[in-house]
Image (cartoon, helix red, strand yellow):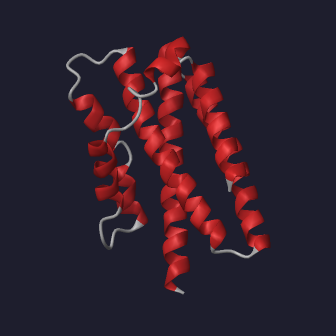
Amino acid sequence: MGYIKSIVNSLLICLIFSAGLLGNSYAQESAFLQPSQEERQLMTDCVEQENLILSQMVGCIGKVYSHCNSGVTSPNEKALKRCVSKEQALWRERLDTQLEQLILLQTKDLGLQVKEAQAAWLEAMLLNCRIRGQLNNFEKQGALAEALCINKMTAIRSLVVQELLKNRSMK
């Protein structure tokens, strides 16, 4: 499972750096960019409500980003980048954990197929989001559009994998 996690983390970090969202001070700001316990709980409470179906869980996407931005009186690039990073970290953590669980439930061959499917999804997601960013004419807005696209697509992937796990555990 470390294989998928390292690919995901490497590609997303590379993408964020290339988009110019984190700049040169990443190490100094990394703690500032991590979600708070309150933000973690906000997401958990949303996606783990009982009897929610996938289409209802999609409403959880953007909750942490919105909550983070709600305290900002005049949004600026730094504030937006902080909020994007916080939500992105939470969805990525959820997806990594879910993929690990899904692989553990499978035979070796099916586990390999899950890894291959995740690698193909990641490649397609990054390409789609890069295109989304390039469709925006303004450099910083394009980078933000690309990062928000990554958040949404990662969140949706996480919710789909969550459904796979739920269906698998019902058998």
Q: Quadrant location of residue 99? A: bottom right
Coordinates of residue 116 in the picture (x, y in percent): 76, 57
Q: Which residue is drawn at 52% across and 61% down?
A: 160
Q: Quadrant location of residue 164? A: bottom right
Q: Which residue is drawn at 49% across and 84% down?
A: 170
Q: Image check: 77 left or right of 2?
A: left
Residue 6 in view (yes/no) = yes
Q: Residue at x 67, y 35 (%)?
A: 11
Q: Quadrant of the N terminus?
A: bottom right
Q: Image check: 84 left or right of 12?
A: left
Coordinates of residue 63 in the picture (x, y in percent): 31, 44
Q: Image check: 112 left or right of 152?
A: right
Residue 121 in view (yes/no) = no
96 versus 146 height, above or below:
below
Q: Which residue is drawn at 46% across and 18% down?
A: 28
Most distant residue in the right direction: 109
66 versus 167 height, above or below:
above
Most distant residue in the bottom direction: 171
Coordinates of residue 143 in the picture (x, y in percent): 53, 22
Coordinates of residue 105 in the picture (x, y in percent): 63, 74
**How many marks can you see?**
0
Q: In which quarter of the image is the C terminus?
A: bottom right
Which is more toward the observer, 23 or 147? 23
162 versus 73 height, above or below:
below
161 versus 157 height, above or below:
below
